[in-house]
Image (cartoon, rainbow, N blue to C red):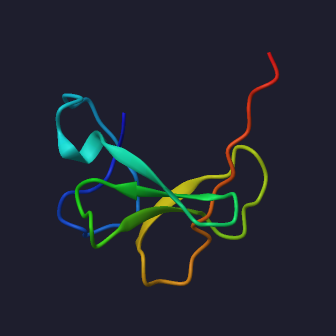
Amino acid sequence: MLCAPLDGSTNNCVVATRSVRHASTRWKLLSAGNGAYYIVSMVTDPVGTRLALCGQGKNAGAGVEIHPAESQKDFQFTLKKPNF
C-alpha cells in the first residue's frame, strides 16, 4: 500500500504492509474546483500533506512524492476512466 510517512521526515511515499485501518494508508480526494483533485493524506489532515508529481513529470506513470500543502508543487490530478 502507498503510505504517508508518520513523522514527516521524508518526501518519499512508503510502500508498506499495514492494516487498511491504519491512517497512513488512507487518502482522500479534495476537489480543486477546476475539475482536478488534490490527494490528501489522512495522517496530516486538516494540515494537508498531499501527493505531488516528482520533478516536472506530466505523463502517465510519473512518480509521486509527498509535500506539505503550502509548498509550490504540482498537486492537482485529473481522474480519467481507463480504456478497457
Kindly indicate the quadrant of the structure image that contains residue 15: top left
- Residue in view at x 72 percent, y 62 percent: 57
For this view, does 22 lie left or right of residue 63?
Answer: left
Where, quadrant-wise, is the C terminus in this rendering?
A: top right
- Residue in view at x 62 percent, y 66 percent: 33
The picture places residue 78, in percent across and down from the top left corner, at: 69, 52
- Residue in view at x 19 percent, y 57 percent: 6
For this view, does 5 lie left or right of residue 40?
Answer: left
Where, quadrant-wise, is the N terminus in this rendering?
A: top left
For this view, does 27 lie left or right of residue 76?
Answer: left
Using the image, determine if residue 21 lies above or below residue 23. Answer: above
The answer to which of 55 and 39 lies nearer the viewer is 39
Residue furthest toward the front? 33
Number of dots carrying numbers: 0
Using the image, determine if residue 2 lies above or below residue 12. Answer: above
The picture places residue 25, in percent across and down from the top left corner, at: 29, 40
The picture places residue 23, in percent across and down from the top left corner, at: 20, 45
Residue furthest toward the right? 83
Kindly indicate the quadrant of the structure image that contains residue 73: bottom right
Residue furthest toward the top? 84
The answer to which of 82 and 35 lies nearer the viewer is 35
Using the image, determine if residue 82 lies above or below residue 62. Answer: above
- Residue in view at x 21 percent, y 31 percent: 18
Using the image, determine if residue 9 lies above or below residue 35. Answer: below
